[in-house]
Image: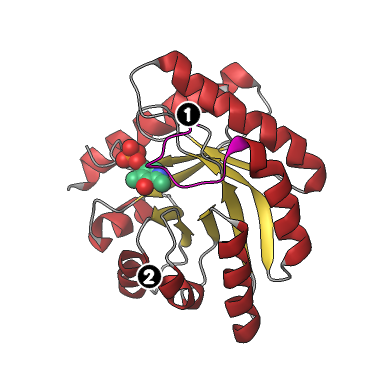
Amino acid sequence: MDKYRLRANFDEIVWRVEKARIERSEHHIVHIVTISKYVTPAEVALLYELGQRAFGENRVQELHHKVEALEELPIEWHFVGRLQKNKINRLIDLDPWLIHSLDSLELAKELDKRLAAKGKKVSALLQINSAREPTKAGVSPEEAYDTYLRIIEETAHIDLQGVMSIGAHTEDTKRIEESFQTTYKIYEALKPHGATLCSMGMSNDFELAIRCGSNMVRIGSLFFK
Ligand SMILES: *Cc1c(COP(=O)(O)O)cnc(C)c1O
């Protein structure tokens, strides 16, 4: 993929994010994480040259590959995929900037144990399945608040910074919006407990997510179309 096309896509995304965030509030700042799972390290390096710093992957093995290939660039790496227990150590060793997909107290405790053994800390978000889709990971909206507090109380090496959701998988905008609103309400309730990040919105629904209060979008295909 050439640089000119990437730049045009990047410009379009920044412009659309800007428009959506200003509709919410002039003071509403939105982080853009480029999900690079579709492309090679070469495209990541090009986007880095264009100024992008935050990139995310959904598989530990692919994250490992890109971290190694792009070692010399100070990229902020995010992990957004399902985390299997047997991949936890490998993920910790990659020092991710943020794990978006902590989806149970059990996983948090296991992660905490491995972090303790390595003398490390990690920042993470609690994933909430607000769309209530059986194929999606995440705690249910009902258990999200309590699970969040228990992770804070029962782990010492995880710095919880907020919540993450994937919008409902449907053409029905109303239902997607409801799923974002559900997550945003929980996020607001968790603000007194230190939540500052609400990660919602992908290529097809990021403007809606921002209008619902998202302050971190995860955009993949739109960068690389
Ligand atoms: C792939 C992926 C994205 C990006 O999706 P696009 O529709 O390509 O923007 C965002 N979040 C997660 C968890 C993903 O796996």
In the picture, measured across the screen, residue 59 lies left or right of residue 99, that is left
Given the image, on which type of amino acid does mark 1 rest? Val
Q: Residue at x 41, y 39 (%)?
A: 134
> Residue at position x 46%, y 14% from top?
174
Residue placed most toward the observer, 133 or 10: 133
Of helix, strand and loop, which one carries label 1? helix
Q: Main secondary structure of the magenta part?
A: loop
Secondary structure category for the residue under label 2: helix
Decide: marks 2, 1 in contact (CB < 8 A)? no
Local crowd size for mark 1, using a 10 Å CA cut-off: few (<14), some (14–19), many (≥20):
many
Q: Earlier in the sequence, mark 2 or mark 1?
A: 1
Please state the quadrant of the image where ligand 1 appears: top left
Figure quadrant of residue 221: top left
In the image, residue 73 lies in the stretch drawn in magenta: no
Front-most of residues 150 and 185: 150
- Mark 1, residue position: 17
* Structural distance between the alpha carbons of marks 2 and 1: 27 Å
- Residue 37 in the image: above or below residue 224: below
Kindly give the residue lying farthest to the right in the view shown.
Answer: 192
Is the CB of mark 1 within 8 Å of ligand 1?
no
**For mark 2, does the 10 Å Cα neighbourhood hold few (<14), some (14 to 19), or many (20 or more) residues?**
many
Colour convention of the picture: secondary structure
Residues drawn in magenta = 131-141
Rendered location of residue 3, percent (x, y): 23, 47
Q: Which residue is mark 2?
A: 67
**Residue 148 showing in the rendered view:** yes
